Image (spheres, rainbow, N blue to C red):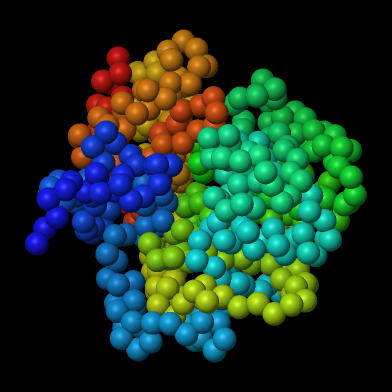
């Protein structure tokens, strides 16, 4: 018998108040196909957020659902205490793609857990609990990752197991360096890094940075900034952790990993990943050079990280992405979509900036004629886009409101045009 109490009321009665829901009338999504999803009322939506950048290739991708079904029919779970063929196969592929020499891979169940593991490795390897992080950053919701998150809206406690120093440079068009050209901006950020290191006591363990900040509103520094940071880090023996939870797997179009826009001084010491690799299955992970990964001197396992079912999904999903050149599609279709969004934004005073790369675009909304964030406008556009059949995301720092666009990487030109037109109508409703 169907429970007569509305699902939203049931949600509120048993789940935490701080568990965010989109929309005045929250959606129950029941199924998806390709770049579209359907709700419990039968409404169809073009999905421009992909489960927070997680449905990377397509909803109900046959190659992935087949791999999951076949593996589930054999064995669902074993843990890392036993040899696991799908896990080894995916690790081999990820290691080869990482750009890190002599790389080792450890799988987790989420990006939060991946970043937590990276912090464990870096602090153990360096024998230090001091971490450099970027202002406006987001790295997860665990106790350790919240403590290195530089975005107030996603950091519920000041208590921390780590001593964190925040560095400028991840937000190009706001802050004290925004008026500088790219070369001067990078030089100023490097000088700020040097100054911050002057405040640290002892050896800092690592810098962790998102090449493009996700929750922070798809902000990014000039190309090469983290490579310039790397020169400073190397002088001090400090590790570089690239948080690729949202930027990995070709989403930016120009590169397979976000760090490759900053590669002039080599790859990171550690890469963390999650989201898109599983196409909705729970996969996170860490890639690190062997001496860093192997620095732990006690036993460890992962009960659910590297599950045979999720690993089979990852192998199939990564194969599909590479065989169909979805990175190239993100570059081509994403470039067209960004051009279309910039043309639309030129007619809407509330849009301060359109930014992004590939199929990772952000529209920052402000009160017209000012730099003041307008979260009400962002909420209104989100609702209007939904009414038009388009799902978007939101983000931003303490002083910004950003619409986030990150559809599956198989998005077609026609779907990009359709989504842009729906968004245009939603934005014009603000005028």
| Residue that lies at the very extreme toward the left in this rendered image | 1
Which residue appears farthest toward the top when viewing the image?
Answer: 369
Residue 92 located left or right of residue 409: right
Q: Is residue 145 above or below residue 100?
A: above
Q: In which quarter of the image is the C terminus?
A: top left
Give the farthest residue toward the front: 13
Q: Which of 351 and 298 is in front in this view?
A: 298
Can I make out residue 232 in this image? yes
Picture coordinates of residue 200, whole percent (x, y): 86, 42
Horizontal side of 412 relative to 92 (left or right) equals: left
Which residue does the image show at 75% across and 40% down from the upper left? 165
Residue 250 at x, y percent in the picture = 49, 56
The image shows residue 274 at horizontal and vertical percentages of 51, 60
In this rendering, the answer to whether 381 lies above or below 412 is: above
Q: Nearer the viewer, residue 105 or 101?
A: 105
Tell me what residue is drawn at x 45 percent, y 49 percent. 331
Q: In which quarter of the image is residue 59?
A: bottom left
Vertical side of 154 occupied by 290: above or below? below
Q: Where is residue 276 in the image (x, y as percent from the top left)?
A: 44, 59
Question: Is 137 in front, or is 155?
Answer: 155
């Amino acid at each position: 018998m169907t429970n007569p109490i509305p699902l939203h009321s049931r949600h509120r009665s048993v789940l935490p108040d701080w568990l965010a829901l989109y929309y005045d009338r929250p959606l129950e999504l029941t199924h998806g196909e390709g770049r579209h999803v359907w709700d419990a009322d039968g409404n169809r939506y073009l999905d421009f957020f992909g489960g927070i950048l997680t449905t990377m290739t397509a909803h109900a991708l046959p190659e992935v659902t087949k791999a999951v079904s076949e593996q589930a029919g054999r064995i669902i779970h074993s843990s890392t205490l036993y040899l696991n063929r799908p896990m080894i196969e995916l690790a081999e592929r990820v290691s080869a793609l990482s750009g890190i020499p002599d790389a080792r891979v450890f799988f987790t169940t989420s990006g939060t857990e991946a970043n937590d593991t990276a912090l464990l490795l870096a602090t153990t390897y360096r024998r230090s609990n001091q971490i450099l992080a970027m202002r406006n950053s987001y790295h997860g919701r665990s106790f350790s990752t919240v403590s290195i998150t530089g975005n107030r809206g996603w950091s519920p406690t000041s208590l921390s197991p780590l001593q964190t120093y925040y560095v400028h440079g991840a937000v190009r068009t706001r802050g004290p360096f925004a008026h500088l050209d790219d070369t001067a901006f990078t030089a100023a950020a490097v000088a700020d890094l040097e100054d911050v290191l002057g405040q640290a006591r002892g050896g800092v363990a690592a810098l962790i940075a998102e090449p493009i900040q996700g929750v922070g509103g798809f902000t990014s520094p000039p190309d090469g900034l983290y490579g310039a940071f790397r020169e400073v880090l190397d002088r001090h023996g400090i590790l570089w952790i690239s948080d690729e939870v949202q930027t990995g797997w070709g989403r930016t179009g120009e590169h397979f990993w976000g760090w490759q826009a900053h590669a002039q001084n080599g790859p990171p010491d550690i890469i963390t990943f999650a989201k898109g690799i599983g196409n909705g299955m729970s996969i996170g992970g860490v890639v690190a050079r062997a001496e860093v990964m192997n620095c732990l001197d006690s036993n460890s396992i992962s009960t659910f990280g590297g599950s045979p079912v999720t690993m089979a999904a990852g192998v199939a999903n990564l194969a599909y992405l590479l065989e169909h050149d979805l990175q190239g599609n993100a570059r081509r279709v994403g470039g067209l979509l960004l051009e279309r969004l910039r043309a639309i934004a030129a007619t809407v005073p509330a849009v301060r900036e359109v930014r992004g790369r590939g199929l990772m675009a952000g529209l920052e909304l402000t009160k017209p004629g000012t730099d003041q964030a307008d979260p009400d406008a962002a909420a209104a556009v989100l609702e209007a886009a939904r009414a038009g059949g388009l799902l978007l995301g939101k983000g931003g720092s303490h002083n910004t409101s950003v619409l986030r666009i990150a559809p599956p990487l198989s998005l077609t030109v026609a779907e990009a045009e359709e989504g842009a037109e729906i968004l245009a109508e939603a934005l014009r409703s603000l005028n």
